[in-house]
Amino acid sequence: MLLAIDIGNTNIAVGCFDGKDLKAEVRLTTHSGRTLDEYEVLLASTIERRVPGSKIARCIISSVVPPITQDIAAVVERAFGIEPLVVGPGIRTGIQLKVPDPSSVGADRVVNSVAARHLYGTPALVVDFGTATTFDVVNEDGDYEGGIIAPGVKIALEALVSRTAKLPRIELSWPKTVVGKGTVAAMQSGAVIGYLCLVEGLIARIIEERGPIPHLICTGGLGRVFTEHSRVLEKYDPYLTLHGMRIISELNERPV
């Protein structure tokens, strides 16, 4: 089996693949204070519980948190006796990064672009609702053209609450009306509907600049909420990043 580990700023997503079939997906909280032993116990016990008796033969890691990357790689070697493939310069992805400094493109954005190309077609636009919200453009040739990085909706809301004396912390859910009848409803409208307007507005600008984009894919934890209420967003794929890692692993596969 293939173990795919996506290390984000908030969560670590772990997927277990049997061929192209995602057998299990689990999430751990990203925590730089955890020891190798803690990560090993969490990872090994969780996988055994979700996929009993599985034999991990390969592993791929995509990370946007460099301090944790080497720790997780060391845990994989200790727990499963294999050296993981880490997404970064020098590995085969099947796409070209058509930007002045390819090394500046985050591993998650490369992985998402690979997945969009292989699973949905091109041209494509991937919107990833994570700690930050990223927009990544894949051209008609299947190459990465660049994108946008915006503050994530949770970050934006946290900034609002932390800088105001009387505004409370609220749940990020879709409000009943655009015009709120109270503080919480007004905040939900601004945070959720307002954020969707930001996303749809940026998508409109991207299409105005680059022309029609037939494949528009959303992913990330809050992607489902926005897709359900959007006039523009249509496809939501919560496992897009993990499948992109699987595809890259297959491109770099060595006999085991």
Image (spheres, helix red, strand yellow):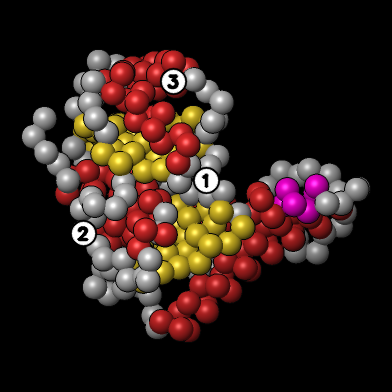
Q: Which residue is mark 1?
A: 221
Q: Which mark is residue 94?
A: 2
Spot the residue most to the left: 255
**Three-letter code, disc 3:** Leu
Query: Is disc 1 placed on a helix, strand or loop?
Result: loop
Drawn side of residue 219 relative to residue 15, left or right: right
x 52%, y 23%: residue:
34
**Three-letter code, disc 2:** Gly
Q: CA distance from mark 1 to mark 2?
A: 27 Å
In the depicted structure, whether residue 97 falls above or below residue 86: below
Between marks 1 and 2 in the image, the one whose residue lies nearer the viewer:
2
Q: Main secondary structure of the magenta part?
A: helix
Drawn side of residue 198 relative to residue 147, left or right: right
Q: Which residue is mark 3?
A: 36
Q: Confirm whether residue 138 shows in the render.
A: no
Q: Nearer the viewer, residue 184 or 7?
A: 7
Q: Where residue 46 appears, x then y in whole percent?
A: 40, 20
x 81%, y 57%: residue:
186
Reply yes or no: does residue 224 show up in magenta. no
Q: CA distance from mark 1 to mark 3?
A: 26 Å
Q: CA distance from mark 3 to mark 2?
A: 33 Å
Q: Which residues are magenta?
A: 157-162
How packed is label 1: few (under 14 Cα within 10 Å), some, or many (20 or more)? Answer: few
Marks 1 and 3, the one that precedes in the sequence:
3
In the depicted structure, whether residue 242 falls above or below residue 181: above
Q: Where residue 17 appears, x then y in whole percent?
A: 26, 34
x 36%, y 23%: residue:
75
How packed is label 3: few (under 14 Cα within 10 Å), some, or many (20 or more)? Answer: some
Q: Where residue 95 appears, x then y in whole percent?
A: 25, 62
Between marks 1 and 3 in the image, the one whose residue lies nearer the viewer:
3
How packed is label 2: few (under 14 Cα within 10 Å), some, or many (20 or more)? Answer: some
